[in-house]
């Protein structure tokens, strides 16, 4: 009979059915449909979400599938059912795949018929025994390797259904968790990787990241947002944490004399970063004391929970509420939640951020503690075998302070290495097939999971990244400055391609009249972060993956030939000449002409 209704009638019936369902779920109608007392007010930790869903339906909206799944069975309430079904080796249904993500497990079929587990590691810091313990879990329940992510986190893949809960139980034994690391929740809390050991930093982010991590874990009302959410703390040190790509960024700043608040160290609030949607977080003018970060972040989230889009997943991030309302209206709603006005400072009364170092996550660097160093290890697009992990944990315990500090650049650093132990660390790392030597391209190479392990990816980003690095190192031997190359497989932009000097986003390239396709990329240039945040400009579309190394080579050759000197970065050169001029110069390079 559905074909007898026109489009407007169908929309009315869908809205009516959704309304009936919502009323039943809140006690408005008896199971048989008979009228009863008015719906009771939702209570408990999920009430804020139920009210937001109800408002959406009342206003004529249709909840997206994920909102219906959350409403039908909260992922935490359904945990025991999920365990019993997974124990049989049964793959999850789509709605249960979504629910498992609340516990940190992602079913990644068809690319891999198994789960991936993403952890929660506040500020990215692990003890050596935790690092080795994760390796043991990856051997017992996964594929024998792990990946460092762009949120200074770890992922373990190839976990069979019946091994999912035992893996999570093993994390608990290590004092770790994966709770809320996926789906519509607040992702891993990032902070400055060199927190507490960096002479340049204004503030140690470790206590702030840990405190916010625990705040999230212990408040169920902060789970089940309209969409995922990212929070980062930057301490003003030499190593950037990319807080401008987060929904909320807290930046340590020095407020000078003459401001509306007392001079000293404050946190500046920036909002709305989501680089995959071509937007970076913007300064709100708000400053707060470090101890107020949790309460302010909580209020920002609750405004988002109440007003975020629960009908269209493509428009459900906080950025779109900010776009619709403007920052002033959003901050007024936050202040209403807090019950007080937020302090604001004119940028003229803020000391400039000290320069970051693009090579600070690789190689040997002096710590603020006399006679100690941090040592950054280069990882091949974030991957480590479990044997390497255990050996690296042993190096940390025997030659450093016993900590492994993950970075947003898909690598890690040893900290607390005495001067007398640096050479030993370098030699032992080299013996594992890894390196601590900074390089022009490999140290700034970032790639998401790609088509080997993610159903959204259009290209094998990790495989192609290594091919590009090998080719560039052979072909461009005079590259003497750091250049960031980011490869991401899809529009989610997990590798944040828009902020790279050179960014590649996966695309299917049509190669025949019949519509046959091969893996490829659209290419952008001129992105930036930290002192020079910027979204890159697209210069080529639909480049075949096999041609991508030659395009990157040509861009680098054009830059080296035309820059004013080594002091002019790739981004500065692109800004000075224009992205289109760089493209034209690259197309004149022999590397591209030969490839054509």
Image (cartoon, rainbow, N blue to C red):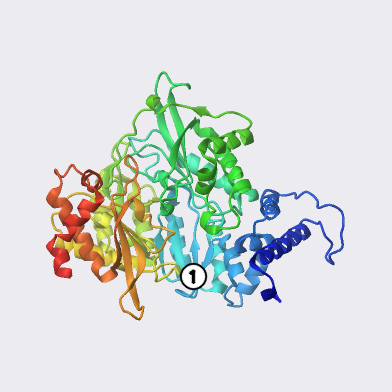
Residue 423 visible somewhere in the drawing = yes
Towards the viewer: 216 or 532: 532
**Where's residue 433, x and y in %?**
27, 64
**Where's residue 54, x and y in %?**
70, 53
- The kind of secondary structure element at disc 1 is loop
The answer to whether residue 156 is left or right of residue 361 is right
User: Which quadrant, please, contains the N terminus?
Assistant: bottom right
Q: In this figure, what is the number of numbered marks?
A: 1
The answer to whether residue 374 is left or right of residue 591 is right
Residue 355 placement: quadrant:
top left
**Where's residue 542, x and y in %?**
31, 66
**In this view, 83 is above or below 38:** below
Residue 438 visible somewhere in the drawing = no
Towards the viewer: 477 or 18: 18
**In this view, 43 is above or below 367:** below
| Residue carrying label 1 | 108
Towards the viewer: 91 or 429: 91
Residue 485 placement: quadrant:
bottom left
**Where's residue 342, x and y in %?**
54, 29
Which residue appears at 34% of the width and 50% of the height? 499
Q: Residue lying furthest bottom in this view?
A: 514
Towards the viewer: 336 or 452: 336
User: Which quadrant, please, contains the C terminus?
Assistant: bottom left
Q: Residue lying furthest top in this view?
A: 258
């Amino acid at each position: 009979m559905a074909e007898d209704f026109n489009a407007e009638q169908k929309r009315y019936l869908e809205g009516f059915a959704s309304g009936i369902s919502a009323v039943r779920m809140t006690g408005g109608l008896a199971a048989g449909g008979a009228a009863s007392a008015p719906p009771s007010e939702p209570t408990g930790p999920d009430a804020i979400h139920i009210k937001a869903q109800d408002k959406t339906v009342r206003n004529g909206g249709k909840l997206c599938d994920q909102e219906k799944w959350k409403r039908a069975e909260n992922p935490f309430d359904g945990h025991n059912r999920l365990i019993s079904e997974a124990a049989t080796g049964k793959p999850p249904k789509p709605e249960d795949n979504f629910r498992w993500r609340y516990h940190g497990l992602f079913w990644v079929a068809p690319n891999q018929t198994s789960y991936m587990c993403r952890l929660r590691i506040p500020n990215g810091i692990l003890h050596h025994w935790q690092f080795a313990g994760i390796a043991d879990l990856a051997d017992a329940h996964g594929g024998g390797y792990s990946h460092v992510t762009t949120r200074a986190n770890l992922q373990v893949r190839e976990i069979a259904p019946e091994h999912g809960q035992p893996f999570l139980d093993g994390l608990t034994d290590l004092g770790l968790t994966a709770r809320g690391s996926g789906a519509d929740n607040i992702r891993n809390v990032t902070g400055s990787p060199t927190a507490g050991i960096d002479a340049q930093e204004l503030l140690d982010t470790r206590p702030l990241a840990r405190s916010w991590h625990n705040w999230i874990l212990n408040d169920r009302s902060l789970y089940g947002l309209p969409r995922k959410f990212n929070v980062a703390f930057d301490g003003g040190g030499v190593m950037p944490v990319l807080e401008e790509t987060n929904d909320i960024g807290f930046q340590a700043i020095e407020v000078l004399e003459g401001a509306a608040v007392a001079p000293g160290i404050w946190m500046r609030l920036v909002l709305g970063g989501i680089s995959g949607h071509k937007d970076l977080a913007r300064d709100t003018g708000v400053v707060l004391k470090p101890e107020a970060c949790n309460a302010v972040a909580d209020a920002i989230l609750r405004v988002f929970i109440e007003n975020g889009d629960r009908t269209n997943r493509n428009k459900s991030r906080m950025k779109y509420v900010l776009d619709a309302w403007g920052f002033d209206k959003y901050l007024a709603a936050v202040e209403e939640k807090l019950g007080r006005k937020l302090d604001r400072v004119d940028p003229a009364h803020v000391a400039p951020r000290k320069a970051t170092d693009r090579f600070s996550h690789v190689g040997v660097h002096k710590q603020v503690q006399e006679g100690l160093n941090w040592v950054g290890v280069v990882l091949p697009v974030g991957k480590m075998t479990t044997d390497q992990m255990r050996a690296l944990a042993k190096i940390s315990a025997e030659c450093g302070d016993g900590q492994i500090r993950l970075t947003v650049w898909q690598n890690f650093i040893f900290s607390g290495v005495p001067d007398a132990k640096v050479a030993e660390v370098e030699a032992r790392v080299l013996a594992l097939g890894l390196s601590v030597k900074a390089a022009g391209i490999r140290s700034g190479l970032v790639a998401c999971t790609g088509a080997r392990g993610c159903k959204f990816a259009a290209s094998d980003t990790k495989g192609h990244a290594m091919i590009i690095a090998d080719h560039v190192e052979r072909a461009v031997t005079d590259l003497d400055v750091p250049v960031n190359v980011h490869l991401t497989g899809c529009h989610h932009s997990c590798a944040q391609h828009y902020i790279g000097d050179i960014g590649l986003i996966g695309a299917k390239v049509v190669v025949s009249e019949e519509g046959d396709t091969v893996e490829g990329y659209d290419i952008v240039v001129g992105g930036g972060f930290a002192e020079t945040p910027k979204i890159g400009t697209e210069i080529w579309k639909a480049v075949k993956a096999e041609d991508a190394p030659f395009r990157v080579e040509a861009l680098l050759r054009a830059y080296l030939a035309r820059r004013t000197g080594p002091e002019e970065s790739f981004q500065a050169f692109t800004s000075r000449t224009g992205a289109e001029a760089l493209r034209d110069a690259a197309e004149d390079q022999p590397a591209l002409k030969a490839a054509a």
